[in-house]
Amino acid sequence: MTRLFMFEKPLGMRDTLPELYEKKHQIRTLMEEKIKLWGYQFLETPTLEYFETVGSASAILDQQLFKLLDQQGHTLVLRPDMTAPIARVAASRMLKEDLPLRIAYAANVFRAQQREGGRPAEFEQIGVEFLNDPTVSSDAEVIALMIDSLKSTGLESFQLSIGHIGFVQDLFLQILGTEDRANTLRKFLYEKNYVGYREHVRSLALSSIDKQRLLDFLDLRGGEDIIEKAFAIVENEEGREALQELKELWNIISDYGEQGRVKFDLTLVSHMSYYTGVLFEAYAGDVGFPIGNGGRYGRLLEKFGRPASATGFAVRLDRLLEALGGNGSKEPVTCIFFSQERRQEAFKMAQELRAKGIRAALQDINGVKNVDTFSSKFEDAAYLLGKAGKEQSNE
């Protein structure tokens, strides 16, 4: 082992120390219990998948995939997201009947980084997929569930931005005419480069009316009234149908009582190419990136030979922890120090504490050089010492 790599980790990989692990476990458990209450069932998929299936079906860029070869020469990938693996499982084993299906997961995903300092290449997601229900009600359900699960963690200050990729696509193609020209504008939106967007629009060979429509598009952010303003700049039926979906979505979310948590942002786009309808992102506190996102994807399951509608969301646990504040929480533990002649008594004490749900660590007094320093790391300490030491017990 070379000294250069002795304490180093691959780019983007992180260690999770005990206190942060405990906090992450608490948050994951709270969200899992909330998701189960909504009727979703959890499953697991392999960490390794075939590149030709899940790897190519995923919307993650090829250069972000971790690839390796198995002994038969097949190219494998570490799963870059959970949506594609669940689509594989659902299409092959679960969508035997034409019925709605509610699936949930909590898993690590892997996306290779190049030089992005500080960005993790491995991170945990918890999320849901609602399959085989094409109604706006299913979109509203996953949005309301995302809000409810975030609230279950104690997160108070957060907001969801909701858009519709169908509206953006229809408007841009209607005005610009080609997919390439539309993609250029979408890239400005994805990067939140609104100055560049405006400059590019002004440079286009378009009528002043069409330029103004593209500039007015940037103002389509806010409450329910934004939908009516959007109707004024779109002409095709596809774009109007998308807006009608958003109008219905608002009404259903209002019935859930969560309209105060959401706002419309019709400029919202995603790097995930499989989104076809409603899409949304969750923002919280001072975190500079979305802590979660989701939306409707209508063609992914076709790649696995089973056409079906689908919508869902994923929450990044690392970003959620950042939004909640702090680096973790130290769980209280009682440490029982014992000498050899009182070992059996110490073991019994530990069993009694654990039976009450109290964490208890056993420590042979001869295995500690500085008892005072070591005991300071625990919430409480009990000393069971015999002839060799001071007789003391903090029971």
Image (spheres, rainbow, N blue to C red):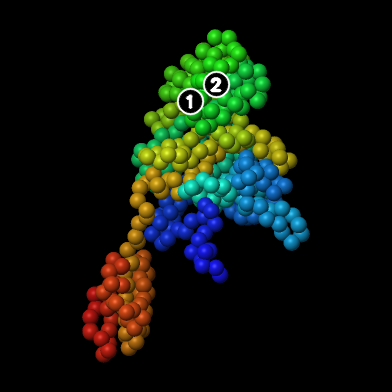
Q: Which mark, by number, is residue 208?
A: none
Residue 26 vs 269, above or below: the answer is below
Q: Which residue is disc 1 drawn over? A: 194
- Do tag 1 and tag 2 residues touch (Cβ < 8 Å)? no
Nearer the observer: mark 1 or 2; the answer is 2
Q: In which quarter of the image is the C terminus?
A: bottom left
- Residue 235 picture quarter: top right
Q: Residue 9 location in percent, x, y?
A: 52, 59
Q: Residue 126 location in percent, x, y?
A: 51, 47
Residue 340 falls left or right of residue 241: left
**Label 1 neighbourhood size at 10 Å, few (<14), some (14-19), many (20+)?**
some
Q: Residue drawn at (58%, 9%), measured in percent from left and top?
A: 207
Residue 185 vs 124, above or below: the answer is above
What is the secondary structure assignment of the residue under circle 1?
helix
What is the secondary structure assignment of the residue under circle 2?
helix
Q: Quadrant of the N terminus?
A: bottom right
Q: Residue drawn at (60%, 46%), measured in percent from left and top?
A: 64
Residue 176 falls left or right of residue 161: right
Q: Which residue type carries mark 2? A: His
Residue 78 falls left or right of residue 261: right
Q: Which residue is disc 2 drawn over? A: 200
Q: How far is mark 1 from mark 2, CA to CA?
A: 10 Å
Q: Residue drawn at (28%, 72%), measured in percent from left and top?
A: 373
Q: In the displayed image of the protein, which residue is found farthest to the top?
A: 208
